[in-house]
């Protein structure tokens, strides 16, 4: 059994090319839910959906978001109606008292659908309708995610990090922004003072997630350490489980250059150097690292080097093989 902690696009890309390296039937993917949003009453789980859509063969691989070729009828007509009604475009948080009312799993991340700041295609929207409806019937997010995995005919087991609400909130000089507002609506441009995982202190890791981590080995792909992996690490018990598991991490940096996304800005804000060394400091539980050939960082743990840029599945398979080699390196050292 191998467990992947997945957020953003880095780890899903690794999974896409790693099927011949890690047996899908013996693979569990624990998805980050810190950047989930409730938009227009529908719970959207971006990091989980990327894994579901990729495994189901429908992912838009240009954006690594949503369903390829999805129709935009509802989204476009909703925008047209909103404009006709004089509604100002942009994220519209529901009132504070409504953020904690109703469906608990959506706490602190509720947006009105009157101004849909994230593009959601028609088939994509159907996924969120089904997810939200099953949650309203009383199923847990773990149960619903596994049901969706069956619908997409996935072999890997995809589970959320928690059945409880955790919201990734980025604090800026102008105020707090949910991560999706910061990244999607604002393009990651605001200055960042801190990152909060709201609700993490009261949330538990999902049973399936913590069991998968304990069973290990665990692979952390080149995901954003702060907002993709950070929400999982904020859950009580996850770090303890990682401390006893064999853990291999792929750096999303080459020295101090990040491949993509806001990781550098966010790591600076929470007190880590924006570099591979900073990733190692953020992951003290990691037993080994996979670094790019050009990365000259010297670490105090075993390192396997390869070209870590992933532009297609051939690249991703190469990185997956490096992850397997790193796991074997740790296992061999433990036997010795």
Image (cartoon, rainbow, N blue to C red):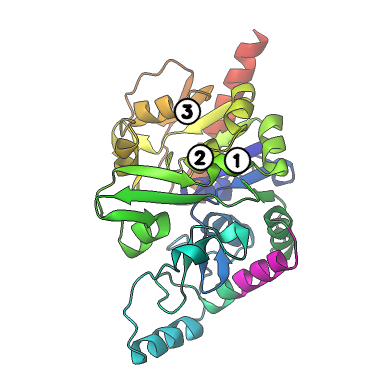
Q: Which residue is mark 1?
A: 4
Q: Which mark identifies residue 283? A: 3
Q: Nearer the viewer, residue 52 or 331?
A: 52
Find residue 86 and report its horizontal and vertical position in percent. Answer: 32, 88
Inspect the magenta stretch and tell me whether residue 127 lies in it. Answer: yes
The residue lying at 28 percent from left, 46 percent from top is 192
Q: Which mark identifies residue 221? A: 2
Inspect the magenta stretch and tell me whether residue 89 lies in it. Answer: no
SS at mark 1?
A: strand
- Looking at the picture, does residue 305 appear above or below residue 2? above
Q: Would you say residue 19 is visible in this rendering?
A: no
Image: magenta residue range: 126-139
Q: Quadrant of residue 200?
A: top right
Neighbor class of circle 1 (other Cα within 10 Å; few <14, some 14-19, many 20+) is: many
Find residue 276 and report its horizontal and vertical position in percent. Answer: 36, 30
Quarter of the picture containing the C terminus is top right
The residue lying at 33 percent from left, 77 percent from top is 89
- Looking at the picture, does residue 72 appear above or below residue 47? below
Q: CA distance from mark 1 to mark 2?
A: 7 Å
- Looking at the picture, does residue 208 appear above or below residue 35? above
Q: Would you say residue 275 is visible in this rendering?
A: yes
């Amino acid at each position: 059994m191998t467990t992947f902690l997945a957020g953003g696009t880095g780890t899903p890309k690794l999974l896409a090319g790693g099927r011949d390296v890690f047996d899908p039937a013996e693979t569990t993917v624990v998805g980050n839910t810190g950047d989930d949003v409730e938009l227009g009453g529908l719970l959207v789980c971006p990091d989980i959906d990327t894994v579901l859509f990729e495994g189901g063969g429908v992912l838009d691989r240009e954006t690594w978001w949503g369903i390829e070729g999805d129709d935009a009828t509802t989204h476009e007509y909703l925008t047209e109606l909103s404009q006709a009604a004089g509604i100002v475009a942009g994220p519209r948080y529901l009132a504070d008292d409504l953020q904690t009312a109703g469906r608990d799993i959506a706490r602190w991340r509720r947006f009105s659908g009157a101004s849909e700041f994230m593009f959601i295609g028609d088939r994509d929207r159907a996924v969120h309708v089904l997810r939200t409806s099953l949650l309203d019937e009383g199923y847990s997010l773990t149960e619903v995610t596994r049901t969706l995995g069956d619908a997409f005919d996935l072999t890997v087991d995809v589970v959320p990090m928690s059945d409880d609400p955790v919201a990734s909130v980025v604090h800026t000089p102008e105020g707090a922004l949910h991560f999706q507002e910061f990244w999607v609506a604002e393009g990651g441009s605001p200055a960042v003072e801190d990152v909060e995982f709201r609700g993490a202190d009261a949330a538990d890791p999902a049973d399936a997630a913590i069991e998968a981590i304990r069973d290990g080995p665990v692979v952390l792909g080149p995901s954003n350490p702060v907002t993709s992996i950070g929400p999982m690490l904020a859950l009580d018990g996850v770090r303890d489980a990682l401390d006893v598991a064999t853990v291999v991490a792929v750096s999303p940096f080459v020295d101090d250059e990040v491949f993509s996304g806001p990781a550098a800005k966010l790591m600076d804000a929470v007190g880590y150097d924006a570099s591979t060394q900073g990733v190692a400091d953020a992951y003290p539980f990691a037993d080994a690292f996979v670094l790019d050939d050009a990365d000259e960082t010297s670490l105090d743990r075993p390192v396997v080097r390869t070209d870590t840029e992933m532009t297609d599945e051939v690249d991703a398979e190469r990185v997956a093989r490096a992850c397997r080699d790193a796991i074997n390196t740790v296992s061999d050292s433990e036997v010795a």
